[in-house]
């Protein structure tokens, strides 16, 4: 037998499977999806098996050296999926495969063998096999490779031992064994005998009596830590009962449960609203019989989308199928996770970004072994290795974080589409502010469309006041808080209600704006704001390369108050303290949330009323639900609007809508104050009226006129090198080759300097292809990239290719 192996040489020119012979001794364990170790030139490398064959066309094949896992970490579907991802996003096959397994499996080479209870008790009639078991019994855990060396027939016995559940295998990760055991207690005798024993205990043995009572009521196993904390008794009480033969204590393999010790209260089910029911009935059509059923659920914040997800998920599980729920950033959505945990309990695996690698591996294993039905996580949870997937949900589907910003640069929405087709699954894209791409798809009828326009209980959407910061300046207010915002803050402080204050992500101070009239300097050709380059004091368009000198006065109104723009959260905190003495501010940004659990602690403190203001960046815009928040302040809506990115207007609309959704979700009415220098801008205008439709109409027109997605697709190439002349020369040569290779209808812009012109002392240039959905474009690009490989290596130029880029930097 031969295996086709993709090896760990993630460069383009060796990006194909190589044939290896499977030695007899490994044959039962080498399957599609297995990780193997193989000789490659003089080296020993890791690889993934992507196919098996009886013959090989290669004259001299070498042998596979070892198989790294007993159960292949990847399913056949995943292997297929990796192929599609590497084609679509132009990464190597190995990189795509690698990104689908948990991090701990990316380095480990060794595995250990243990005997199960059955293995311990097993007696073989074959003396050799008996010796084999005794050998393990005496030395376990024992390394797989060692036993293979010691026993010539180890393969057969191991294979059979695994199939008959006598032998267990675990990965070793570094020095740490990745699995963990828990102590389980169970009653050793009948309920009647337990009762009799309880009667015989002395009066002082109160604790032991309690434990016995527990087992009289619940005649089943429970983990020791759980029992101890439930009854508040000590180890000693348990030990006495075990010694008396009333209880059995055993160590079983357990998973580290990151949520252990927390209780999840099931949220009571409500009767569905009419609009919820309509959506559920609609989606259910795609489930019986199962078909690929992609749909967009456009529902305003608070319309009850999550309740719809829960219901569809319940029905999916009832069909014996599995579900994936993706959320933009899982540490920001504890409330959401709790609702799913509350409904589906231990059937849920949570792929939390703040779990340790071992914990993540455990969650992943539960999925791989089919022990759970639901996986919840951020982007990479789209690779949850379920085999009978019925449902994929992308909540907040418009979020940029669904695109991975390193290779493989996949978009979870696209991967969801591939998996959905493969499994005939329902794919729900949910959002209050759908991406232009998805809404466009829905309008064209390529995916189904469902809408929920009303909040549950007809709670009104919060009133949004747009404050013109130019007027504030004219009236002599030079602070970052407008008069209406100051009044509203004071009002909430008096009433003891809470405030969420939002500032855009730190550190963007690269656009130039006039503080008197709000004018932002833009590229005359591209309709995006120009980027300020401090080094030579110029403004530049990073799409087309247009450059102009830094203005001294505003070209629009002549004011001298023109400067580049930006404010940090820390500064806001200081200012708040200055203008509102005694105000309690909880600041959430990358500085205050670095440590594990810090997020949740800060949010909990705010929920408990330990702060008047929750101040933060993007991270506070999502999913949070606080009954006492009645004011949301957005300090500078413009900072997003003026990013040099064609999605700037879309992002601003999404953000304002989302932040606004944080207010007034409960009994108390909410209000949003939006400070801006661009009161007339359509995304600010429509967001303040909660009018997605009108925003879409205006924005889609822009996209059409400027050849942007969803009408055109983009591929962004970034070159990086220390040496600028070389960089210019090579990137121009590359661009020339691309131009020649592109089919008509596709065109290339650039190369020009990237908006972030230097990172880590490497200068950056970029060029961009725009094309209609033409299947010849990606293969053409692929060929040019491949042909360029030689020169790239020789010159040391770094090249990244980003298909469907989300970040234009
Ligand atoms: P979304 O996900 O669209 O923001 P949620 O599903 O979180 O909305 O619902 C908003 C609030 O309304 C939640 O507190 C939820 O418990 C409640 N809710 C949802 N559906 C119903 C219903 N049918 N009846 C009563 N309350 C509901
Ligand atoms: Zn001006
Ligand atoms: Zn331009």
Image (cartoon, rainbow, N blue to C red):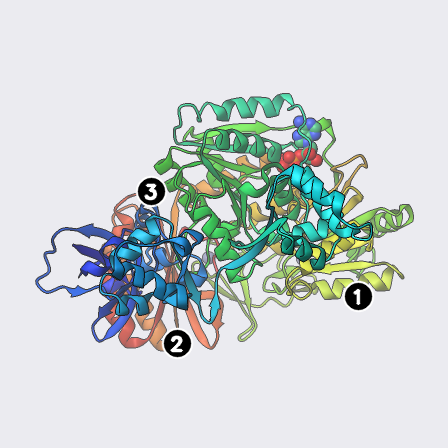
Residue 78 visible here: yes
* Residue assigned mark 2: 724
Residue 365, horizontal then vertical, whole percent: 45, 51
Residue 171, horizontal then vertical, whole percent: 41, 62
Mark 1 element type: helix
Residue placed at 64% from the left, 56% from the top?
A: 243
* Upstream in sequence: badge 3 or badge 2: 2
| In this view, 176 is above or below 376 | below
Q: Are marks 3 and 2 in contact (CB under 8 Å)?
A: no
Residue placed at 33% from the left, 45% from the top?
A: 77
Task: Tell which of 510 and 272 is nearer to you.
Answer: 272
* Upstream in sequence: badge 1 or badge 3: 1
Quadrant of the frame with the N terminus = bottom left
Q: Is mark 1 within 8 Å of ligand 2?
A: no
Residue 527 visible here: no
* Residue assigned mark 3: 773
As measured in the structure, the alpha-carbon distance from the residue carrying label 2 to the one carrying label 1 is: 42 Å
Left or right relative to 604: residue 252: left
Mark 3 element type: loop
Residue placed at 34% from the left, 54% from the top?
A: 123
Mark 1 Cα within 10 Å, few/some/many (few <14, many 20+)? few
Q: Which mark is residue 671?
A: none
């Amino acid at each position: 037998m031969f295996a086709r192996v993709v090896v760990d040489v993630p460069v383009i020119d060796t990006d194909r499977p190589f044939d290896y012979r499977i030695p007899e001794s490994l044959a039962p364990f080498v399957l599609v999806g297995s990780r193997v170790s193989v000789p490659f030139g003089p080296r020993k490398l890791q690889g993934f098996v992507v196919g098996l064959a009886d013959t090989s066309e290669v004259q001299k094949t070498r042998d596979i050296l070892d198989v790294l896992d007993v159960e292949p970490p990847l399913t056949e579907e995943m292997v297929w999926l990796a192929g599609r991802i590497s084609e679509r996003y132009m990464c190597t096959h190995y990189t795509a495969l690698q990104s689908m397994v948990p991090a701990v499996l990316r380095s480990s080479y060794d595995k250990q063998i243990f005997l199960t209870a059955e293995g311990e008790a097993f007696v073989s009639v074959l003396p050799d096999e008996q010796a084999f078991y005794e050998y393990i019994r005496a030395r376990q855990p024992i390394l797989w490779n060692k036993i293979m060396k010691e026993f010539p027939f180890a393969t057969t016995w191991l294979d059979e031992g695994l199939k008959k559940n006598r032998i267990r295998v675990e990965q070793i990760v570094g020095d740490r064994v990745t699995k963990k055991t828990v102590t389980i207690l169970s009653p050793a005798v009948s309920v009647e005998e337990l009762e009799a024993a309880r009667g015989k205990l002395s009066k002082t043995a109160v604790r032991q009596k309690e434990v016995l009572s527990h087992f009289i009521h619940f005649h089943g196993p429970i983990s020791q830590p759980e029992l101890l904390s439930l009854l508040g008794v000590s180890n000693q009480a348990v030990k006495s009962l075990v010694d008396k033969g009333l209880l059995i204590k055993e160590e079983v393999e357990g998973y580290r449960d990151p949520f252990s010790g927390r209780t999840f209260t099931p949220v009571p089910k409500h009767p569905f609203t009419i609009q919820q029911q309509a959506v559920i009935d609609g989606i259910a059509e795609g489930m019986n019989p199962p078909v690929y059923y992609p749909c967009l659920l456009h529902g305003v914040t608070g319309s009850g989308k999550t309740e719809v997800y829960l219901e569809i998920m319940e029905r999916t599980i009832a069909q014996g199928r599995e579900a994936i729920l993706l959320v933009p950033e899982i540490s920001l959505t504890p409330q959401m996770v709790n609702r799913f945990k509350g409904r589906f309990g231990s059937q849920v695996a949570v792929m939390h970004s703040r779990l340790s690698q071992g914990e993540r591996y455990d969650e992943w294993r539960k999925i791989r072994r089919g022990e759970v039905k639901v996986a919840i996580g951020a982007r990479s949870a789209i690779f949850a290795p379920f085999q009978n997937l019925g449902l994929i949900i992308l909540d907040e589907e418009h979020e940029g974080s669904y695109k991975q910003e390193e290779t493989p640069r996949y978009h979870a929405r696209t991967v969801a589409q591939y998996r959905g087709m493969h499994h005939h699954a329902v794919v729900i894209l949910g959002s209050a502010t759908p991406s232009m791409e998805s809404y466009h798809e829905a309008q064209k009828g390529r995916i189904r469309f469902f809408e929920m326009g009303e909040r549950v209980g007809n709670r009104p959407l919060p009133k949004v006041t747009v404050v013109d910061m130019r007027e504030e300046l004219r009236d002599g207010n030079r602070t970052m808080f407008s008069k209406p915002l100051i009044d509203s803050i004071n009002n909430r402080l008096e009433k003891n209600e809470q405030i969420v204050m939002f500032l855009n992500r730190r550190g963007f101070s690269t656009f130039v704006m006039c503080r008197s009239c709000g004018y932002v300097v833009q590229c005359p050709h591209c309709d995006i704001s120009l980027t300020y380059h401090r080094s030579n004091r110029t403004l530049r368009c990073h799409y087309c390369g247009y450059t102009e000198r830094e203005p001294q006065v505003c070209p629009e109104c002549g004011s001298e108050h023109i400067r580049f723009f930006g404010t940090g959260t820390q500064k806001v905190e200081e200012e708040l303290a200055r203008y509102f003495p005694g105000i309690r501010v909880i600041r959430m940004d990358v500085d205050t949330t670095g440590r594990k659990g810090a997020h949740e602690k800060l949010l909990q403190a705010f929920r408990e009323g330990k702060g008047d203001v929750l101040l933060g960046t993007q991270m506070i815009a999502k999913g949070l639900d606080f009954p006492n928040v009645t004011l949301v302040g957005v300090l500078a809506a413009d900072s997003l609007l003026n990013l040099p990115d064609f999605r700037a207007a879309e992002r601003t609309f999404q953000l304002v809508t989302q932040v606004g959704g944080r207010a007034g979700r409960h009994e108390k009415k909410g209000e949003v104050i939006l400070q801006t220098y661009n009161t007339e801008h359509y995304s600010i205008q429509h967001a303040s009226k909660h009018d997605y439709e009108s925003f879409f109409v205006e924005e889609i027109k822009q996209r059409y006129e400027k050849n942007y997605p969803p009408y055109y697709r983009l591929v962004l190439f970034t070159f990086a090198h220390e040496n600028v002349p070389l960089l210019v020369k090579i990137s121009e040569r590359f661009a020339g080759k691309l131009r020649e290779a592109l089919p008509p209808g596709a065109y290339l812009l650039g190369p020009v300097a990237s908006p972030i012109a230097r990172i880590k002392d490497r200068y950056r240039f970029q060029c961009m292809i725009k094309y209609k959905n033409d299947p010849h474009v990606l293969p053409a690009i692929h060929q040019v990239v491949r042909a360029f490989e030689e020169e790239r290596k020789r010159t040391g130029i770094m090249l990244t290719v980003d298909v469907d880029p989300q970040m234009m930097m």
